[in-house]
Amino acid sequence: MKVLVTGAAGFIGMATAQRLLERGDEVVGVDNLNDYYDVNLKLARLRLLEPHARFRFVKLDIADRAGMEALFAAEGFDRVVHLAAQAGVRYSLVNPHAYVESNLVGFMNVLEGCRHHQVQHLVYASSSSVYGGNVKMPFSESDGVDHPVSLYAATKKSNELMAHTYSHLYGLPTTGLRFFTVYGPWGRPDMAMFLFTKAILENRPIDVFNHGQMRRDFTYVDDIVEGVIRVLDRVATPDEAFDPAQPHPGRSHAPYRVFNIGNHEPVPLLEFIGCIEEALGRQAEKRLLPMQDGDVPATYADADALREWVGFAPRTSIREGVGRFVAWYREFYGA
């Protein structure tokens, strides 16, 4: 297939493009290479993809309407994996406009490109953050997600609503994946694993929010990519059992699906830090702080629906995954 991967210089985007190329697909990668975090890391990821003869990179902002229209018209994509977005919960508190431009305007441009150019299937990144203030665990796609606690979460919920509209009006098959705390080699520098590892190696204290009383459903990047590829290969279909009198939020009479994609095994934050300490062979100095605005105390994925749909089952333990990240970090940064 010919597949568009947006956010190809990003963490999950690069890993997804790699897997598609390895199995023989043609991949066009799009990224605007913004400076939200170290551009050199993004360029290093792209260097892993560029040797593939079936890979081509286009530097383009998905919020550029004319540029996206021209890209879709010229390429004739079979399927699209949309992973580009302005990421980060905390950054949305200081730069909200970036989220509107990338996550709303950019997503609209992707939807329009798919609609007008007969794309067979759009798979896009949603987020566990859509569960917001929910306290019932584990989070299920059958739960309501109408109480976001960050603008980032609100834009991801909006993406699901926009996708459903296009599935309903134009018959565009769309599948949204609610990612649960993805980690691993080549990960983002603004995420906890990267920040903790860097600080510990530099003998600086680490900030531990909510006084360490946090749990996260950490999901290793290779497991995530396996799920993304399996979902891409199974085109979304209408749910024949859909009951509009009791509508399921993750399914529809239209070719629309939404799934959690997580490890189904939440890990206490202090245990997670312990795995990093073990891999590094040194202890962290912990600075215990209150909960930050926009954050939630726990995430926990009910991943049964995705397992039933495509046989998705994560295989990487937190200790194994953290060890791989630390090994990569030491090699990449010479630490």
Image (cartoon, helix red, strand yellow):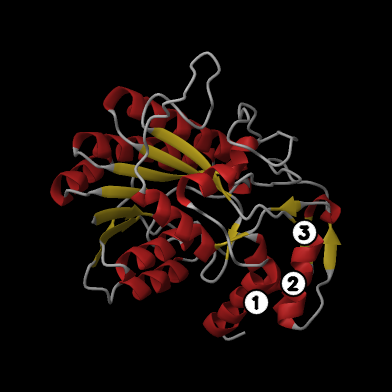
> On the rendered structure, is 73 left or right of 296?
left
SS for callout 1: helix
Judged from this view, the residue extending furthest toward the left is: 74
- Badge 2: few (under 14), some or many (20 or more) residues near its Cα, within 10 Å? some
**Residue that mark 3 sits on:** 269
Q: Amino acid at mark 1?
A: Gly
User: Mark 2 or 1 closer to N-term?
Assistant: 2
User: Mark 1 or 3 closer to N-term?
Assistant: 3
**Quarter of the N terminus within the rendering:** bottom left
What is the CA distance from the residue labelled 1 to the residue labelled 3? 16 Å
**Quarter of the C terminus within the rendering:** bottom right
Q: Which mark is residue 297?
A: none
SS for callout 2: helix
Q: Nearer the viewer, residue 217 or 159?
A: 217
Q: Position of residue 317 (x, y in %)?
A: 66, 67
What is the CA distance from the residue labelled 2 to the residue labelled 1? 8 Å
**Residue that mark 2 sits on:** 275
Q: Position of residue 234 (x, y in %)?
A: 36, 47
At horizontal 53% and vertical 62% (from top left) the residue drawn is 223
The answer to whether residue 45 of the structure is visible from this angle is: yes
The answer to whether residue 107 is above or below residue 16 is: above
At horizontal 76% and vertical 45% (from top left) the residue drawn is 297
SS for callout 3: helix
Q: Which mark is residue 323?
A: 1
Q: Nearer the viewer, residue 140 or 117?
A: 140
> On the rendered structure, is 120 left or right of 100?
left
User: Mark 2 or 3 closer to N-term?
Assistant: 3
Q: Amino acid at mark 2?
A: Cys
The answer to whether residue 204 is above or below residue 87 is: below
> Mark 1 and mark 2 in contact (Cβ < 8 Å)?
yes
> On the rendered structure, is 186 left or right of 18?
right
